[in-house]
Image: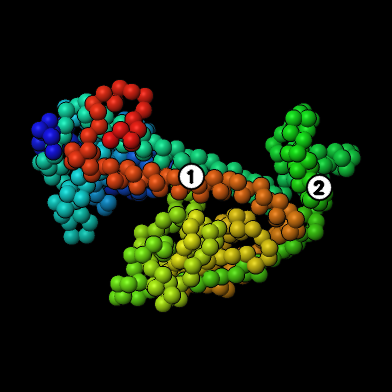
Amino acid sequence: MSAEWREHKFGELCDISRGASPRPIKDYISDEGMPWVKIADATASGSKFITKTKEKIKLEGVSKSVTVRPGDLILSNSATPGLPRFMKIEACIHDGWMLLKNFRGLDKEFAYWLLLHERMNLVAQGNGSVFTNLKTDILRNHRVSIPELKQQKAIAKLLNSLSDKIQNTVEINQTLEQMAQAIFKSWFVDFEPVKAKIAALEAGGSEEDALLAAMQAISGKDEAQLPRLQAEQPEQYAELRATAELFPSAMQESALGEIPEGWEVVTLSAAVDLIGGGTPKKSEPSFWNGDICWFSVKDAPSDGNVFVVDTEEKITQEGLNHSSTKLLPIGTTIITARGTVGKLALTGVSTAMNQSCYGVVASDGTGPYLNYLRLSEGVDTLKKNTHGAVFDTITRSTFETVIQPRACLAIRQRFEKTVTPMFEAIRNNLIQSRTLSEARDSLLPKLLSGELSVSAEDYLTEEVDTADV
């Protein structure tokens, strides 16, 4: 470590205070009021920011708590201790949080990364019979070494650059999944193309008018935009027209109420095949720490990142061969079926899984992404109809309780073609994001220990590149 790095107690570098709760807190929880930051709001995603909370407290409870504002840095001290987060909203924090303010010779962005780097050392000093508690005095007295301020800013900018790229990927993927979900709902839940045709015919329009109405419902374009699409992108227009032609122009009665004419009502069990998982022997070292992803509930993706491209534990080919788990191809839907039920994931790489999960593949010609979305649509029913005296369990018979309308194969295939580029983009973004995360996690200890340095002038430039370190 360079002589430019100096050791300090953390409490010398900033003011540290603890949050507070109005008591009894249950009397203050409300649907309206001030956002109330809980530890679960910090662990809900990998973001360094808290942008929303699940709960709020009544305004009369604000004076009995501690208010934090956008830009404030907070640190969890219980339950899941040692997690730093920046606030993006005004909110209140309870005594499971510390608030760090009035930084002296310590850049606040650098402090975030420093706290992440020191997290294990801090948690090791905590106490508590049930949860580890990280007292404010532990943080105040914890000794850290930091470089001069310009070097701090350069290090923080490099790490922030990687973190921002990862977060941007998360937001893009959320948008892409929402787009796919919206198309699914329009076609297979709300039947908008069919209803658009019916409305046009009931208004006295011709079959051509009905077709144009369905094209508008599918594309989101209005009547004036369709001719422009035809002139500028004739192939896209022709495909849109062919898609609209697949939808009927009438409804029929069914066990689910009115559904498009010619569609079927089927149970999910009749439309999918289930694949069981398994666990290689934990006592056999040659079965573990390989390069094959092995999925369990803790690997369930969040933040709209529907694919799993990495897992906490991995197995070897020998472990795969000597257990009941199977290697699922890319695009297989996994559902957690025991204990924490109903978590869904798509395999972004070839993946094995434990016995608490099912691999769900279509048996009726439906593509992998429509299969995932129709399972997403039915997952609440699956969770409601779990079995088990000790653990909630989804069994093969549970899939019989989900009843859905099913379109003709041509519509299902057209839908798959429509959403496949969205899902492939999500998967590719996640793989890129994993590479960025690995680079960040590799750089963090080297930069925060002084093993690697960044030019102090880099923080003044527009962008810091990892090649500069």
Element type at marker 1?
helix
Residue 245 falls left or right of residue 70: right
Residue 370, horizontal then vertical, whole percent: 63, 55
Residue 234 falls left or right of residue 2: right
Q: Quarter of the image holding residue 199?
A: top right
Query: Dot 1, crowdedness within 10 Å: few (<14), some or many (≥20)?
Result: some
Q: Nearer the viewer, mark 1 or mark 2?
A: 1
From the viewer's side, name the closer residue of 449 and 112: 449
Q: Residue at x 45, y 48 (%)?
A: 431
Q: Residue at x 36, y 38 (%)?
A: 162
Amino acid tagged 2: Glu
Q: Quarter of the image holding residue 139?
A: top left
Sooner in the amino-acid sequence: mark 1 or mark 2: 2
Give residue 429's mark.
Answer: 1
From the viewer's side, name the closer residue of 94 and 122: 122
Q: Residue at x 80, y 56 (%)?
A: 261
State which quarter of the image contains the N terminus: top left
Amino acid tagged 1: Asn
